[in-house]
Amino acid sequence: MLFAGCAAVADKADLISLRNVTRHYKSGDRAVHALDGVSLEIAQNEFVAVSGPSGCGKTTLIHLLAGLERPTSGEIFVGDLAVHKADDTALTDFRRRQLGLVFQFFNLLPTMNVLENVSFPLLLQGVAPRESEQRAQEVIELVGLSERARHFIHQLSGGEQQRTAIARALVHRPSLLIADEPTGNLDSHSAASVMQLLEKIGAGQLTTLIVVTHSDEVAQAASRRVEMRDGKIVRDSFASS
């Protein structure tokens, strides 16, 4: 069964912890404080939107969570992994096994069909082809693309391509799924279908879900909203029931 054993835990233990994290760098002669003393706790299976204007630090935040950048100071934990000091081998294993990433641009392989794109991460992990295909078919059904499983990428709409990318990010059953502006490259109809899917994933508590967006409409779909300005968290609120 898809995501067997990954349902919400009773104690809602924290999966993510950022402790006084800063990320400073220079741009020419200018010092940039991309993150400035950010502390944040996110529980397992929460659905969190990180919002704010361009340049507020939200992309830097997820790059640090994914181990794609190192903080200037502070501590970052995802589960038992100290991301801020993990070596490259540990970070590669973390991204391959525990993390799902979805970007504004879909980054799908054009020579593969939907099923092949979605199953590919499992094959890289050494999962047997038959099991890889079965698990891929399950998650393709979840995202509503069963009838398109044998279609190639150029035969899909933008929304279908993004749903394929989401399926690929979910197929290895990650503990954390990060979507960076997942509707930013879509028309309004396709964006709505992708957000409905993300709401379904969040409501079903299939994984901890962080959606980064500058759109108020997208952010309002989450159960919790973290707003950023100038490298700081300025508001952290839960949706009213």
Image (cartoon, rainbow, N blue to C red):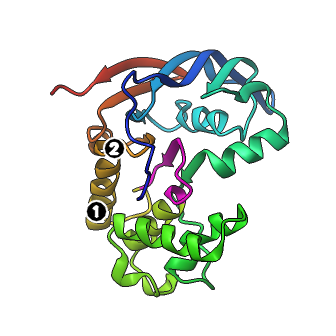
Viewer-side label of 2, 1: 2
Q: Is residue 227 above or below residue 145?
A: above
Q: Magenta includes 92?
A: no
The residue under the point 71% across, 61% down is 125
Q: Is residue 193 above or below residue 10?
A: below
Res. 143 visible in picture: no
The residue under the point 33% across, 66% down is 187
Residue 22 image point, x, y percent: 67, 19
Identify which residue, 59 or 140, lies in the foreground: 140
Q: Identify the mark nearer the N-term, 2 or 1.
A: 1
Q: Which residue is mark 1?
A: 193
Residue 153 image point, x, y percent: 51, 81
Residue 51 image point, x, y percent: 41, 34
Q: Write the start and end of the magenta stretch as one range.
A: 169-182
Label 2 amino acid? Gly
Identify which residue, 147 or 55, lies in the foreground: 147
Res. 120 visible in picture: yes
> Is 88 left or right of 207, judged from the image as shown?
right
